[in-house]
Image (tube, rainbow, N blue to C red):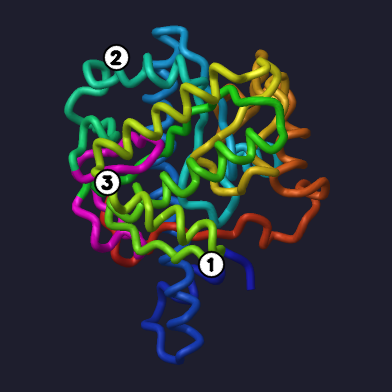
Amino acid sequence: MGEKCFECFFSSREPSSKYDKAIVGVKWMNEKLRKLQLCELEILKEFVRICEKYALKYYLTGGTLLGAARHHGFIPWDDDIDVAMPRKDYDRFAEICQQELGKRYFYQSPETDPYYFLPYAKIRKNGTTVYEERFRLARFHKGVFIDIFPLDFCPKPGLFCHFIFNVLAVVNYRCQVDSGELGIPYKELSGKIGYTILRLFSKKQIQKLRKYLINISHCLSDGGHVVLYAGAYGYYREVMPQEWYFGQNTMSFEGSMFSVPAYPDGLLSQVYGKDYMTALEQLDERRHIELDKSTF
């Protein structure tokens, strides 16, 4: 049955069978997902406007970069947008964005939201709400958002770089728990010990420790490698040559051109595997938001 016939079929009568209701439910969820994606795209364009005004560097990353490469837009099931910024630009954006965003949007960080403690920033749209099960206990602003990850220089890949990454991973986990996330307890003994020790520190002390470790990372950097310490894919996939990111390159995403890493193929191959362009649709199929409980 063609798409138009399909729509006419359901517009002419109330769904009766369980199958009919399931089809209508799927159609409704897809429409709401698309509405969410377009709302996020609106936020992304506002973010880019500010970056271009102040000559700040940014890059589509994660599933958003994968979507640009594979679909020239969102991965069909994706429900968030990820961008990365070099630490210097990330800090500068934090300084100027609030005066630029106005009342329609909210820049969320530990400095602007006392209940938010994650190691990366978000831009939220005021007057909207998204429901994430893992944050159902959190009290911070929960509007529709895009994620902004700081991109840091790091030591040459090896034991010391791995050590800093792992310590920051435990620090970030402690921060996520403090933000109200229902985190998964560490299985590794080292992680359990590290988390137990960090629970003895206050939130301010944890923030200082995080900044100290990032400063060490920059000071001991060989200038050749960068890392997303707040990334979701672990040490071996988040540390990469700096030339893969830095440079001028753009890709089409939802009908507009956006800045992307200089060598997206290398980055995507390392994160998702060399077959990222042809892998089954389940690649990076992770839903963050429960659409039926969200309003936007």
Looking at the rendered structure, the secondary structure element under dot 1 is loop
Find the distance from the CA under tag 1 to the CA under tag 3: 32 Å
Residue 94 position, x and y percent, is 32, 21
Write the residue at 47% across / 52% down.
79
Q: Circles 2 and 3: CB distance less than 8 Å?
A: no
Q: Which one is nearer the viewer's eye here, 187 or 9?
A: 187
Q: Which amino acid does label 2 sit on?
A: Ile
Residue 259 coordinates in the image, percent (x, y): 58, 22
Mark 1 crowdedness (10 Å alpha carbons): few <14, some 14-19, many ≥20 = few
Residue 207 position, x and y percent, is 32, 35
Q: Where is residue 104 in the image (x, y as percent from the top left)?
A: 21, 31
- Of the numbered discs 2 and 3, the one sitting upstream in the chain is 2
Q: Is residue 164 above or below residue 258?
A: below
Q: Name the residue under label 2.
A: 96
- Is residue 130 shown in magenta? yes
Q: Is the magenta stretch mostly helix, strand or loop?
A: loop
The residue identified by callout 1 is 187
Precedes in sequence: disc 1 or disc 3? 3
Which residue is painted at 17% across and 28% down in the image?
A: 103
Q: In this view, does 294 lie above or below 221?
A: below
Residue 138, magenta (yes or no): yes
Give the vertical position of 80 relative to 193 (above or below): above
**What residue span does the magenta drawing correspond to?**
115-139
Disc 1 marks a residue whose amino acid type is Lys
Give the label on residue 143, or none.
3
How far separated are the C-alphas under marks 1 and 2? Answer: 41 Å
Decide: is 171 above or below 56.
below
Quick check: 44 left or right of 219? left
